[in-house]
Image (spheres, coloured by chain):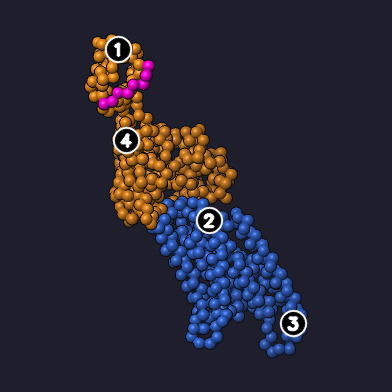
Amino acid sequence: MIRVIAARELRGLFLSPLAWTLLAVNEALLAWVFILLVKDFQNTRGRLTVLEYAPGVTDLVVAPLFRVAAWGLLLLIPLLTMRLFSEERRTGTLDLLLSAPVSASQIVLGKYLGVLVFLLSTVALMALMPLALMAGATLDGGKVLAGLLGLGLLAASCAAAGLYLSSLTAQPVVAATATFGLLLAFWVVDLGAGQGTASALFGYLSLPRHNDALLLGLVRSEDVAYYVLFSMAFLGLTIRRLDNLRLRG
Amino acid sequence: MTGETLIAVEGLSRRYGQTQAVEAVSFTLKRSQILGFLGLNGAGKSTTMRLLAGILAPDAGRILINGTDLLDQPRRAKQAIGYLPEQPPLYRELTVDEQLCYSAGLHGLDRATRRRAVARVKVRCGLADVGQRLIGNLSKGYRQRVGIAQALLHDPPVLILDEPTVGLDPIQAGEIRALIRELGRERGVILSTHLLPEVQATCSHVQIMRAGRLVFAGALAELQRQRQSACLRIGLNAPPPVAELARLPTITQVESLGGGRFRLRHTAGVAPTQALLEQARADGWELWELIPEQASLEQVFVELTLGRETVE
């Protein structure tokens, strides 16, 4: 049942020009950044060789590229998730799901899975550029994989938040704006943080900060758990929201 | 199979904020009955249907679908329902085949059964030629058919159709009605409408709702009985004084229409036709016209929905 819903969601995404446009724009901008990073690396390479533990191409090209890609997700995901529920409420197709013999959790997980498959293929596309470096350079495979894991987890978390906010309104644009606002808040929540317990809390809440260690090739269960909990919390809220729709109409 | 109870509703109530949309509605639907829900816009028809389809939760009351409690075992109960909302829930970007396959999957049909079910309902609803067309490009009539086809995929014993012919041209509406009549032979069908002729053309039973309450429930024939003549219009060449006409049995009021014509109101169901004929012959009134005037079904409907108790 979850598979059926996910498959339709994915099909809907690929049938809409929006998803293709987002993919194209995202890929084009990243390619530009990638070229700049490679050029920079070529210019500084000579000077780096004198260092004993010189940073390699993975640290100087791949990690910064993934850092920019994370910002790209921040813009991409609200536009991808905005229609998940709001569009179905607006056009009345949600009635089909609600009157079918499926539970609220199956509906939510199906839709989440659909958009997740799309996002993971986006991340896979992003990975193609650094992998192209393998033609002429040696990459640190572990670091690249950790970076991709970080991007994937970040995308999954943002998508869960977007899914929830999409279930709150029947206007896709409102959902997109709210999602962008919420994600941005989680992005910059640690900006003013200095030292102390409160600051540590704000630092912990920050979405991209948990990606930092992963970009260095460090997979800590703390960071993975943060993203998994973040996603699960919003999925739970969405399921509750869907049950509430039946009560409040 | 005939006569088996498919829907049993007891004391169903639902409010939206301050508005009581549905109040203490109880009824049953049996197999091979087509039940027409009549009422003005906002009378609570759609809310009742959404409650039956499990899209809304009731504040009070019990809904049994094919013997299963909709609130206790929603998934099992929903499997027995085919529901078509007011706006057919179709994805504009999908083709008819894709939409139907998706819906079949949602109702738990496996891949092989899915294809057969889709082919079956397409033939049944006259969609065989449009399988590859995009739903967004179909006319309203075809979309309505896809909606009905979608409700039939899992072969449910109960069909709930919310205003299935609204916005269709007379020919399309006629086709849909014929389809519903055919479907109602081996199923239980509920359809809502605010068009009385639709009920006359399609339904075996009627329920009239007003402000969230059921004000009439029964067989269509019973509603017809309510409109039985309560008026005779007569024409006489040599009319007697009005007072003499008023002396005829069961006459309540005599109205002179001029030119020897009169309208005689009498107690419903007991027309004084025989007495009038005998009197007219005996006294030489020269009767040349005798028409029993019927309140149209339309009038009965209006009076029931607007809340007047008496039917003239």
Q: Which residue is mark 1?
A: B285
Q: CA distance from mark 3 to mark 4?
A: 90 Å
**Picture coordinates of residue B100, whole percent (x, y):** 50, 47
- Residue at 71% in and 89% down: A51
Query: A133 above or below A102?
Result: below
- The boundaries of the magenta stretch are B252-259
Q: Is residue A111 visible?
A: no
CA gap between label 2 and label 3 equals 51 Å
- Give the distance between the C-alpha atoms of the residues marked 1 and 3, in whole angstroms: 124 Å
Q: Nearer the viewer, residue A97 or B261?
A: B261
| Residue type at tag 2 | Glu
Under mark 4, the amino acid is Ala
Nearer to us: label 1 or label 3: 1
- Residue A81: where, in percent of width, then height? 55, 62
For mark 3, give the secondary structure: helix
Q: Residue at x 62, y 71 (%)?
A: A71
Identified by mark 1, the residue type is: Trp
- Tell me where residue B189 sits by quadrant: top left
The colour applied to the residues of chain B in this rendering is orange
Alpha-carbon span between mark 1 and mark 4: 42 Å
